[in-house]
Image: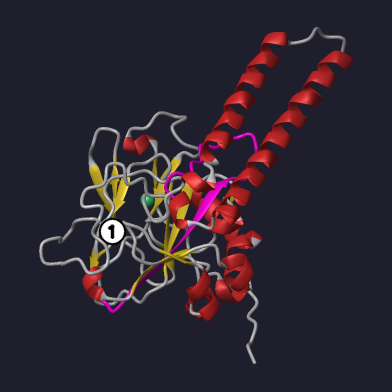
Amino acid sequence: MEHVHKFEPKRHLAAKQAPKVRLMKDLGFGEDAGVSAVAYSEAFQLFTPEAIRIMREEIDKPEVRETCKFSSNIAAAQLRGYAKKYAPFTYEAWNHAETLKMISDIAGIELVPVMDYEIGHINLSTNAKTADEGQVNGAEGSRSNGGNAGMGSSRTDDEDKPIVGWHTDSYPIVCVLMMSDCTGMVGGETAVQSVDGGITKVRGPTQGCAVILQGRYITHQALRAHGGKERITSVTSFRPKSAFIRDDTELRTVRPVSDLSELYYGFAEYRLEILEKRIQAERQKMQARHQAGDAMDTLGHKEFLGEMIRFVEQSDRELVEESKVQKGVI
Ligand SMILES: [Fe+2]
């Protein structure tokens, strides 16, 4: 009989001191370049070994391996969208208020998972020779160098080269969690680009550790890792909890490796929620002015309408008809 584990923050969340963070302004960005002043964090212990073990049991379930596996030209094996249905512990771990507080405190902004479908995206690499890429999720691939190197590629001449080149992610903020024991593993850093082109390497996390990155705004690439039997990373993408902070989410890089019905539902649903809250706030503001005897703020309201039009157009652009999406090609 299957034992069901419950996520308990005291037992499963690692309460260590906050990691060092690098700020957007340190990378040369202007004040409103992203959704937070924090660009990225150094690796920090997020979950305990027991939590990682349970999460790994959940992704080893046959139903997950059979129904949630995707591959593309830039990633041979990924597991996507399994958490809500098949991985209750993982789902709860990423949605728990204490986890979200810990991640939000480090990221410098209150965050929620961008949608259920993007909880615990798994990048799988079980052969040391093929290495892996830590943040395939949300990779643009548009400026990819050697972007087709996948499983089975030779490692003799690709030391230090990424599988996916410089890119930005689809979602505002990503948290990359290391699921493997990295003993004996070399490489696997994330390289981050400053506005002036300078490059910094962020050391890759070890098992149970995570890094947080404002991936939508910062050009980065994950470098290859060598050694070790397997490398499994789990990527959860986040957006600001507040409906009044901008949402620049794109789906371009995840459409080809998704159950589109689930991905589109998640995206369309939260975008409508944002819209609803913004419209409600604008309506209340308008009513309050009127009740106070003030004149209609026509220009202000037209500005709001313009914002709403752009927001709706963005939602519409991202929801590409199913028949026009090519599976596995990013
Ligand atoms: Fe990325």
Looking at this view, is 162 or 288 the one in front?
A: 162
The structure residue drawn at horizontal position 55% and vertical position 41%, both measured from the top left corner, is 319
Q: Residue furthest top?
A: 295
Residue kind at label 1, given as amino acid type:
Glu
The spot of residue 303 in percent (x, y) is 63, 16
The spot of residue 284 in percent (x, y) is 81, 26
Q: Which residues are magenta?
A: 226-253
Q: Is 3 left, or right, of 127 in this rendering?
A: right
Q: Is residue 326 magenta?
A: no
Secondary structure at numbered mark 1: loop
Q: Residue furthest bottom?
A: 1
Query: Is residue 246 something one can see in this rendering?
Result: no
Query: Is residue 133 something one can see in this rendering?
Result: yes
The structure residue drawn at horizontal position 35% and vertical position 77%, both measured from the top left corner, is 181
The spot of residue 171 in percent (x, y) is 48, 46
Q: Which residue is mark 1?
A: 189
